[in-house]
Amino acid sequence: MSLIEDIENYTPWNEQEEKDKDLILRCLRQEPEVYTRKNTLAHMTASAWVVNPARTKVLMAYHLIYNSWSWLGGHADGETDLLETALREVREESGLTRIRPVSRDIYSLEVLTVDGH
């Protein structure tokens, strides 16, 4: 299944996520270079909520630009498989090498501004 089909089949948790879903689908369908940073309006990113095998601990990273803790993730940089993007970012940002997804399903959708960049 394609990313667009996955997102179309995703059920949002709330009204804001429904709006974000609509905007993401519009960008995927209409914006050129949406998987790269060349698109100055919007570009795709992917994040991962990293847990230990017992699911009792979460790995977070301290983000210096925002002066806060966050989950791991980053820009697609041309990759169209956003799960692979999320896994790549976890490897790059944490140094972990033995990682696997708990699920291949979309967990959440968000449209975020990138302040400070």
Image: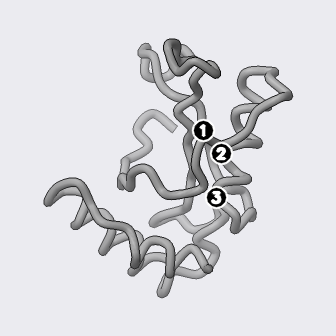
Q: Who's the residue at 72% across and 26% down the image?
A: 93
* Residue type (three-letter) at the residue carrying disc 2: Ala
Q: Who's the residue at 44% across and 76% down the image?
A: 27
Give the Cα separation between the discs numbered 1 and 3: 10 Å
Position above or below: 34 against 77: below
Tell me if 33 is positioned left or right of 7 in this view.
Answer: right
The image quarter in which residue 10 lies? bottom left
Position above or below: 74 against 17: above
The answer to whether residue 64 is seen in the rendering is no
Q: Which mark is residue 25?
A: none
* Residue type (three-letter) at the residue carrying disc 1: Gly
Local SS, label 2: helix
Dot placed on the residue nearer the N-terminal end, 1 or 2: 1
The image quarter in which residue 53 lies? top right
| Residue at numbered disc 3 | 82
Tell me if 32 is positioned left or right of 56 in this view.
Answer: right
Q: Given contact means CB atoms under 8 Å apart, are the residues at marks 1 and 2 in contact? A: yes
Give the Cα separation between the discs numbered 1 and 2: 6 Å
The image quarter in which residue 94 lies? top right
